[in-house]
Image (cartoon, rainbow, N blue to C red):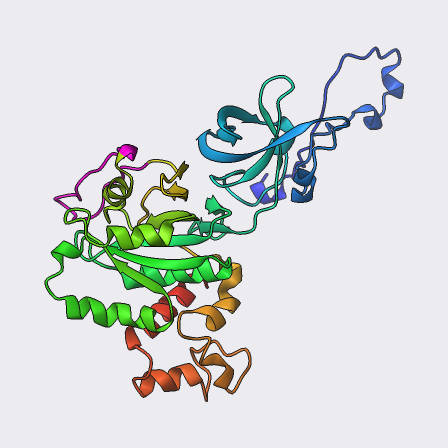
Amino acid sequence: MKKKDKKKFKRRNIRFKNIDIDELDYFEEEDIQEEKRAEKKIPDKAKSSQKSDLKLYKGRILEITTNYKCCVKMGKKVLECFLSGRLKQINYETKNLVAPGDWVNVDLSEYPRIEEILPRKNSLSRFTESGYQQEIVIASNVDQVIITTSWRNPELKPGLIDRYICAAYLQNIEPIVCVNKIDLCTKLAELDKIMNFYKKLKIRVVYTSAIQKRGIEELKRILQGKDSVFSGHSGAGKSSLLNCLQPDLQLKVANTSNSTGKGIHTTTKSRLIPWDFGGYLIDTPGIKTFNLKKEDKDKLPRIFPGFPKLYSNCKFPDCTHTHETDCAVKKAVEKKQFPLARYESYLRIIQSLL
């Protein structure tokens, strides 16, 4: 018999148990009971614990120590808390259930247990490259993202800055560009030419050097009283910069790889740390790629840096600025009123989301 002629077998979830059968002739297939497994709950179920007379206390997650264990700041104390079993059954679309910066409600009646994750005002996330994207929440409930990059070792990547700015705009987070290792810059005019594009858009740009202590006081004024997430290219000197801002952090630092010239990960996980001068820092591991959400592709033509002032003059209201006629963005590029390099960066982002 050929394989294609064989009868296909449909697998069933069957739960076995001991039963007494007196008459085998009267045994029916309906007597087999299918196993009923617990289904994932929708995210709305996480908003309340649905437990009667449960007294909960509000806290903020400082660090994720394991998949289901966190350090939570409760008033002046920091407690190690577990995620409740109910939360583990929620069908979140994110790879991580909670992130540094999350506000949570904790049950302290037995051992500290997180029962509710409070709604986020925003979050900074990156997405996996696979066809079915998974969201990886880097930080939540922040005022600003410090996009940390460097002029050399590794080299400046404006395309990565563009991706971070788009992610920040989508979540109503203020983007701030921090170019570190400015002591390695021998052609400041070349750097200014790139950064002036962002400055004209009212995006704050600060030049720093952890070695020469340049720009540290300016950056400190920007951070004071704010909840800030530091994120950017691996090897940009973020840990060295943070040690300058607050020496008692004593974060581990390392040089870039001699063989590749790329960054070496020294920060391995995100954590929320209070500044001595007011506000909070969320320190994150450096990244080499930063992917946006494919579902946000249609929003990019309106929020990409520099486009908000142009897209309203396009012929079509849903213009993607790629192939359409009478496109205000493409005309601005042709007339050299908009940098070609930034437009090409936009096209690469759009292509990555197809």
Residue 268, percent from left and from top: 33, 35
280 is within the stretch colored magenta: no
259 is within the stretch colored magenta: yes
In-front residue for pair 3/256: 256
> How many numbered discs, if any?
0
Residue 339 image-quadrant placement: bottom left
Q: Is residue 24 visible?
A: yes
Identity of the residue drawn at 49% across and 28% down: 76
Residue 342 image-quadrant placement: bottom left
The boundaries of the magenta stretch are 248-267
Vertical arrangement, residue 143 with respect to residue 338, above or below:
above
* Magenta portion: prevailing SS class: loop
339 sits left or right of 140 in the view: left
Residue 266 image-quadrant placement: top left
Identity of the residue drawn at 32% across and 84% down: 337
Vertical arrangement, residue 175 with respect to residue 244, above or below:
below
Vertical arrangement, residue 16 with respect to residue 354, above or below:
above
Q: Is residue 2 visible?
A: no
Q: Residue furthest front?
A: 277
Residue 98, percent from left and from top: 52, 38
Residue 16, percent from left and from top: 72, 19
In-front residue for pair 47/133: 47
41 sits left or right of 212 in the view: right
Is the N terminus in the top left, top right, bottom left or bottom right quadrant? top right
Identity of the residue drawn at 74% across and 32% down: 50
In-front residue for pair 351/146: 146
Residue 333, percent from left and from top: 34, 82
